[in-house]
Amino acid sequence: MMDWIKKYLVFALCLAAAFVLLLAVGARLFFVYKSYQKEKRELSGIGGRLDQLYNRDPFPSAANVALAKTRLDDLIDEYNELYGLLSSGQIRPAAMDAYAFNVYLEKKLQSIKNKLAAGRVVFSDKDAFGFDKYTSGNLPNSRDVPRLVQQLQMMEQVCNVLPEAGVSELSSFMRDQFDASAAAEASPAGRQRSPRQPAGSAPAAEESLCSSQHFKMAFRAKEGAVVDFLNRLARLPMFIVVTCVEIKNPRLDTSLGALPAKPAVTNAPAEQTELSREQRIVMGREELDVSLEMDVYNFGTPTDYLKGKLKI
């Protein structure tokens, strides 16, 4: 054998190399075949699962429908509970004849002013709280009357708080003049000037989750009375959000949130350059001028709204 290998050395080497290559190729084919069989089994399982899903008939599922309906009922109950808390003391628009409204307005304004006078709150007797054109004898549009009555009753509740809080003077109290913008849009000239101007009427309770009325007022009171007034506003049955408060001391060139300017002192010791305690007091002794804006909210019917949006 050795003699043969020595005689045919080149052929023997080539034969050995070919054998090694065959072994390598065989091993590679073996592992590739195993991988192929594994992937084939996985593909077969996935295909069977896909066929199973295609052959299913899951709809309708009575259990799923019952569960979804139960969750919807729970959601509506929770929302109705929240709605009841928010709307327990709200004032709704009240239908009224236009002629009857003018009489009602006169009596209500007089009642408000009598309560202010009894509480020693200074006010202008000529102030009509934004209802000037109706106190002069003009009749409102019949579609505006319900919201006008609503605004008047809201303003009455706020005015009742003024003497209770110790406010000394009511400078002004203005409502959202929605009826003026509605009248401007109704006229041909108004449509030409502002074709996109909204009618101004509040959305109906059934059409939206909530609507709001905006009011602005200015009054004069001491610091304690201002804080008391804000606290009493928060305790009113109406849902009120104070959107802006500006407090100014008429005797000082400063306002709430601003620092008093340092006086110009020349040739003074270093320890006297700081403001004294008397100079640092901004509020507490003088009456303050307060400008306040608020939104009074009304809430619609949540059950109908949710059932219209979420149907099972």
Image (cartoon, rainbow, N blue to C red):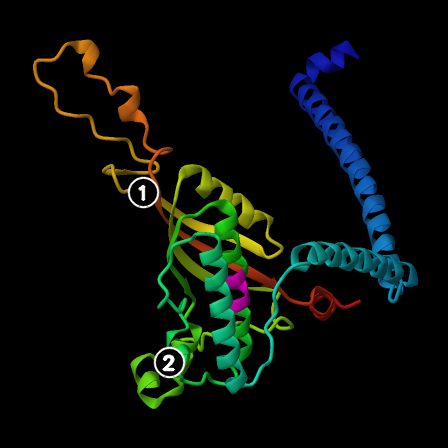
Which is nearer the eye, 153 or 204? 153
Look at 59% across and 73% down and name the residue there: 93
Q: Secondary structure at mark 2?
A: loop
Q: Nearer the viewer, mark 1 or mark 2?
A: 2
Magenta range? 152-156
189, above or below 60, in the image: below
* The stretch drawn in magenta includes residue 212: no
Look at 60% across and 48% down and name the residue there: 235
Tell me, yes or no, whether the two marked residues, 1 and 2, touch with CB atoms within 8 Å: no
Q: Name the side, left or right, on which 215 lies relative to 304.
A: left
The furthest residue to the front? 118
Look at 77% across and 29% down and name the residue there: 27
The circle drawn on residue 136 is 2
Q: For mark 2, does the 10 Å Cα neighbourhood hold few (<14), some (14 to 19), or many (20 or more) residues?
A: few
Q: Secondary structure at mark 1?
A: strand
Residue 165: where, in percent of width, then height?
A: 50, 46
Residue 52: where, in percent of width, then height?
A: 89, 58
> Is residue 201 visible to the viewer in this orientation of the structure?
no
The circle drawn on residue 248 is 1
* The stretch drawn in magenta includes residue 154: yes
Q: Which amino acid lies under the numbered mark 2 shown in the image of this protein?
A: Ser
> Is residue 43 visible to the viewer in this orientation of the structure?
yes
53, above or below 103, in the image: above
Q: Which amino acid lies under the numbered mark 1 shown in the image of this protein?
A: Lys
- In which quarter of the view is residue 280 placed? top left
Look at 25% across and 39% down and name the residue there: 251
Which is nearer the eye, 218 or 208? 218
Which is nearer the eye, 268 or 59? 268
User: Which secondary structure type mostly characterizes the magenta part of the structure?
Assistant: helix
Quadrant, the C terminus:
bottom right
The furthest residue to the right? 62
